[in-house]
Image (cartoon, rainbow, N blue to C red):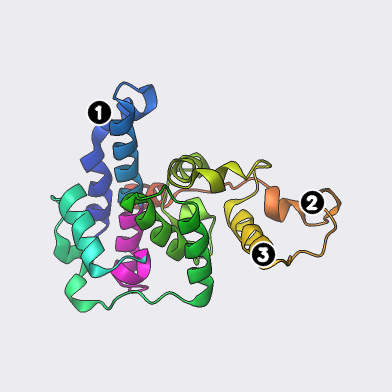
């Protein structure tokens, strides 16, 4: 199963990574390839959780069976759909917290863009995990996450002018929308726990962990 997860990124290939880093493809194509990269990361994490018995494909991604089939058939036709055991899963059931976050993301998504709407569901579901959001999504680093949010939720991303950790920022926005704050500090500068909101989001990506695990076998 881990080999299948790795192969999602193999499908993108070195040529794509080179083009993404050098900007040699037209902008629309670069955006499409980057979206594919993000989906590969998310699906790799989903496969890890499926293999570990921690979640089904719909539970891991927040997407319906129909949406997952569409993503796999259009973006990753070489990956066997049965690896995700879609016939055995139920539709995702978001809890109230996830629904609130999904609503926030959807309100700032690019109008009429089904890809942005899809990422809103994925991000809301993965944000319920315990790591940094970029790690929850299986991304390489926080820069990938910033690029994803700026592309598909530009007004929301633009408001994070102080480079707050993204989960903290999302919940601050939700509190503002409800007219209250969960934080008792009068300002961020006077907060004794400043680093929990603004500190570095360091850590190892899940793909790196997989590669290191394979290398040590």
Image marks 1 and 2: residues in contact by CB distance under 8 Å: no
Direction from residue 172 to residue 85 in the image, left or right: left
* Residue at the spot of label 3: 175
- Where does the magenta region start and end? 42-61
Q: Is residue 22 above or below residue 115?
A: above
Separation of disc 3 and disc 2 at Cα? 15 Å
Q: Residue at x 27, y 44 (%)?
A: 9
Q: Looking at this view, is 192 or 213 the one in front?
A: 192
Q: Quadrant of residue 23?
A: top left
Q: Looking at this view, is 48 or 59 the one in front?
A: 59
Tag on residue 15? Answer: 1
Does the magenta segment cover residue 57? yes
Farthest residue, direction front: 112
Q: Identify the secondary structure beneath mark 2.
A: helix
Q: Residue 28, can we see it?
A: yes
Disc 3 or disc 1, which is closer to the eye? Answer: 3
* Residue at the spot of label 2: 188
Q: Residue 76, can we see it?
A: no
């Amino acid at each position: 199963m881990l080999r299948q997860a790795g192969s999602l990124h193999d499908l993108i290939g070195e040529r794509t990574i080179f083009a993404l880093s050098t900007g040699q493809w037209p902008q629309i194509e670069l955006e499409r390839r980057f979206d594919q990269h993000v989906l590969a990361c998310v699906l790799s994490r989903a496969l890890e959780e499926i293999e570990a018995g921690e979640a089904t494909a719909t539970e891991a991604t927040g997407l319906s069976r129909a949406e997952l089939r569409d993503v796999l058939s259009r973006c990753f036709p070489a990956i066997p759909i049965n690896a995700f055991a879609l016939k055995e899963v139920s539709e995702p059931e978001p809890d109230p917290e996830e629904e609130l976050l999904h609503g926030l993301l959807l309100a700032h998504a690019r109008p009429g863009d089904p890809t942005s709407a899809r990422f809103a569901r994925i991000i809301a579901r993965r944000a319920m995990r315990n790591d940094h959001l970029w790690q929850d999504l299986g991304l390489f680093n926080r820069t990938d996450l910033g690029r994803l949010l700026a592309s598909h939720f530009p007004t929301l991303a633009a408001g994070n002018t102080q480079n707050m950790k993204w989960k903290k920022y999302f919940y601050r926005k939700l509190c503002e929308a409800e007219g209250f704050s969960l934080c008792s500090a009068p300002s961020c500068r006077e907060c004794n726990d400043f680093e929990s909101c603004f500190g570095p989001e360091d850590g190892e990506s899940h793909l790196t962990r997989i590669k290191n695990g394979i290398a040590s076998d």
